[in-house]
Image (spheres, rainbow, N blue to C red):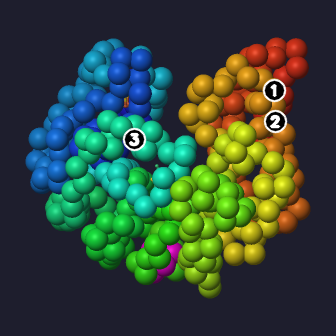
Amino acid sequence: MSNYRSCHSIEGELFFNHLNKVGYCCMLTPSGGQPVLFENYQGELIDWDKFFKTRDEHICLMQNGSELEACKGCLWIKSSDWPERKNELRYILLNIWVKCNLFCSYCSNHKDENVLNNTKEYNIIPVLTDMINKGVITENTKFDIAGGESTLDSNFNNLLDLLINNGIKNININTNATVYSESIKKGIDKGVVSIITSVDCADAKKFELIKKKNLYKQVWKNLKKYSANSKHSSVRAKYIILPDVNDTKREIRNFILKAKLSGVSGIILNIDLHWLRNNSENSLKMLHVIELTRYFIKVSKFLRINYNVWAHIEDLIKRYNILNPNNQIDINFIFQN
Ligand SMILES: C[S@@+](CC[C@H](N)C(=O)[O-])C[C@H]1O[C@@H](n2cnc3c(N)ncnc32)[C@H](O)[C@@H]1O
Ligand code: SF4
Ligand code: SF4
């Protein structure tokens, strides 16, 4: 351990991002954010000696009280005790897909024309294989697989098999679960893959309204198949509250019941972050979301299903408290299991 000024991401993370960029993180700092290491990246092999040398130079900047232009103002920079650095990665995010068979009204990808029109999907397998061979990826590297919808990629099963067969133990996949993948099931049963699926509703009509496809039954059927006979807590269904769209207690209750019946190992509550960004002054609506959150927790406890309330809702409560200094809400109710 040594104490110096640095950030979590630069110390051992790599993000293969949309727009064919590779960087240490996907932060949006006040100065524009996201130091970009490779532009127009399409799966080419990387010179890892050079990469780690450059990374160490960037850390050196921080140690000396400066930082890359894109990192200026980033809240994640801090003086701390950092473990000894090795030339391997602790965490990798694969956010390289944009194609999707759904069109969720809230989706960050589909809201960004620039991302949709200017990201070229590519085959990541050669570079991951190279990273495994060179020890840049080890059994301890944690993976997050995100969007668009990775399971639609014809290379998806090979990609997952590659990671699993090389002993990677912690792979989280955000999938809409419209397509069933044997490789995902194999990974779940082995205890090395977890999935999160945003269902966001409790009936087929609302599903179609939010996601523009009639695949509600298919999604729950697949979640049930993924969960079947699994000893591991690794299939979670998510509910993103979309104010004025799916924000009734009845819908939340029915979603939890459906999740319980399908046998998923847990449920997650979140809020549409676009809505949150644009409605931080609307304390009446925010109060309603807080009420729904309390209800979600109450029903989850009653039905004995594992639940999780994500940080954007904590954010919402903090914003609500700023608006209502004399009538603040104790955020701890989220954490008291
Ligand atoms: C962009 S999706 C891609 C992966 C996959 N297609 C899926 O739906 O899980 C990654 C995650 O971001 C979440 N997400 C997208 N837009 C969001 C928003 N506006 N607010 C909160 N979460 C959002 C989705 O629910 C999903 O869990
Ligand atoms: S300082 Fe912030 S912007 Fe820079 S690499 Fe770290 S997390 Fe990303
Ligand atoms: S399924 Fe995922 S990628 Fe597709 S539109 Fe919905 S959130 Fe976006």
Q: Is residue 324 magenta?
A: no
The amino acid type, in three-letter code, at marker 1 is Leu
Mark 3–mark 2 distance (CA, rounded to whole Å): 43 Å
Q: Is residue 166 left or right of residue 285?
A: left
* Residue 279 found in image quarter: top right
Give the vertical position of 130 relative to 84 (above or below): below
Disc 3 element? loop
Is the residue marked by circle 1 packed among few (<14), some (14-19), or many (20+) residues within 10 Å? Answer: few
Q: Amino acid at mark 2?
A: His
Residue 207 can be seen, yes or no: yes
Badge 3 amino acid = Pro
Question: Toward the viewer: 189 or 57?
Answer: 189
Please state which of the two labelled residues, at mark 3 or mark 1, is closer to the viewer.
Answer: 1
Q: Position of residue 234 (x, y in %)?
A: 58, 68
* Label 2 close to label 1 by CB (< 8 Å): yes
Q: Earlier in the sequence, mark 3 or mark 1?
A: 3
Based on the displayed image, in which of its 4 quarters is residue 204 positioned? bottom right
Residue labelled with disc 1 = 284
Per the model, the C-alpha gap separating discs 2 and 1 is 6 Å
| Nearest to the observer: residue 120 or residue 313 | 120
Residue occupied by mark 2: 288
Query: Horizontally, is 155 left or right of 292 in the view?
Result: left
> Does the magenta stretch mainly form a helix, a strand or a loop?
helix
Q: What are the residue bounds of the magenta stretch?
A: 184-188
186 drawn magenta: yes
Q: Looking at the rendered structure, which numbered label has been put on residue 147?
A: none
State the image coordinates of residue 70 (x, y, percent, origin top left): 31, 22
